[in-house]
Amino acid sequence: MSHQLKGKNVLITGASSGIGEKIARKAAASGGRPILAARREDRLRAIAEDIKKQYKMDCPYYQLDVRKPASIETVFLQIFHELGNIDVLVNNAGFGMFNQVVDATLEEMEAMFEVNVFGLVACTKMVLPKMLEQNQGHIINIASQAGKMATPKSSLYSATKHAVLGFTNSLRMELHDTNIFVTAVNPGPIKTEFFDIADKSGKYVKNIDRWMLEPDVVADKIIACMFTSKREINLPTWMNMGSAVYQLMPAFFEKIARKSFNKK
C-alpha cells in the first residue's frame, strides 16, 4: 500500500461505520493519522482503540454532529489546537431515506440537507483557510451516482447529492491555481449501514444485492487518490456509464430503464 499519507492528518466525518471506518483503517495502514469524527462516541472509541492496537499509532476521535454548525466550529477549533492542521478532509457523513415525494416529510428534507450538504460545506469552510495558508491539502467529498442520475423514491437524497457535486466542481475550479486537491466520490450502492435507514423494508437491497459495492473496494480507491489530482472516483464503472448516457439522452434512458429505476 502507498505511504503518501505518512505523517499526514486525515479527518474523516461519519467515521463510526461503513466506508468512513474503512478509510480510517486504511489511512492508518498508509502511515497517516486518522482523525475520527461522528455522533456515536462509543463506536468511535472502539474503532480508535483497535487502530491504536493494530497500527501502534495515535488515533484521535471527536464526537461531532454535522447538523449543528456550532458543534462543527467547536470540534474543528479543538482539532487545530490539539493536533495542528488537517491535511486531508473526507466529508463522508451522510444519509438517505427512500420515499415518494408525496410521502416524504419536510423534516426528512431538512435533515438530509443539513447533514449531506450544509454540514459538508461547513466542514470544508473550516479547513480551507489553513489549507490556503499552507497552499496544500485535499478535500474529498463523498457524493453519489444519485447525484448524476436521479431515480424514483430518491428525490430528496438525489437533490442533496446533486448539490454536493455542484459545490465540489465549483470549489475545484476556485482552487485551480493552488496545491489543494478536490475530489468527488460517486459510488453506487455500497454494503453498509446506509440502507438500515434508507431502505427499511429491505426490498431495494434484496433486488440489487449482487450489484452492491464492497466498502473495502471504495475505501481503497479513496486512499489511492489522496494527494493526486483525481477529479472524480466513479464506481462501479458500468453504473457510471449509465449515468453518462442518461445525461446525454435522458428521455430515452428513462424509457428503457424504467423497470430498473423502480427497484426501490
Image (cartoon, rainbow, N blue to C red):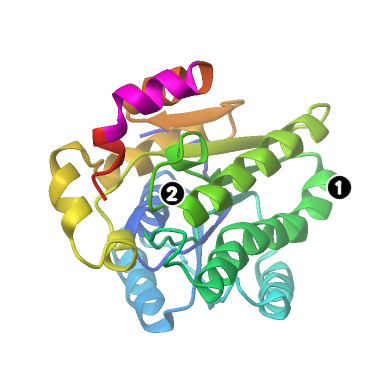
Q: Which residues, given as a range, are shown in magenta?
A: 249-258
Identify the residue at image location x=30%, y=22%.
Answer: 256
Describe the element under mark 1 as helix, strand or loop: helix
Image location (x, y in percent) of residue 223: 44, 39
Describe the element under mark 2 as helix, strand or loop: helix
**Position of 238 compared to 183: left or right?**
left
Picture quarter with the N terminus: top left
* Residue 85 visible at all: no
Mark 1 — residue?
A: 133
Identify the residue at image location x=50%, y=34%.
Answer: 148
- Residue 9 lies within the magenta run: no
Place residue 231 in its image quadrant: top right
Kind of residue sitting beneath label 2: Ala
* Residue 212 visible at all: yes
Image location (x, y in percent) of residue 162: 58, 43
Identify the residue at image location x=37%, y=62%.
Answer: 56
Kind of residue sitting beneath label 1: Glu
Place residue 42 in its image quadrant: bottom left
Q: Earlier in the sequence, mark 1 or mark 2?
A: 2
Mark 2 — residue?
A: 27
Image location (x, y in percent) of residue 236: 32, 30
**Position of 21 compared to 263: left or right?**
right
- Closer-to-camera residue (200/115): 200
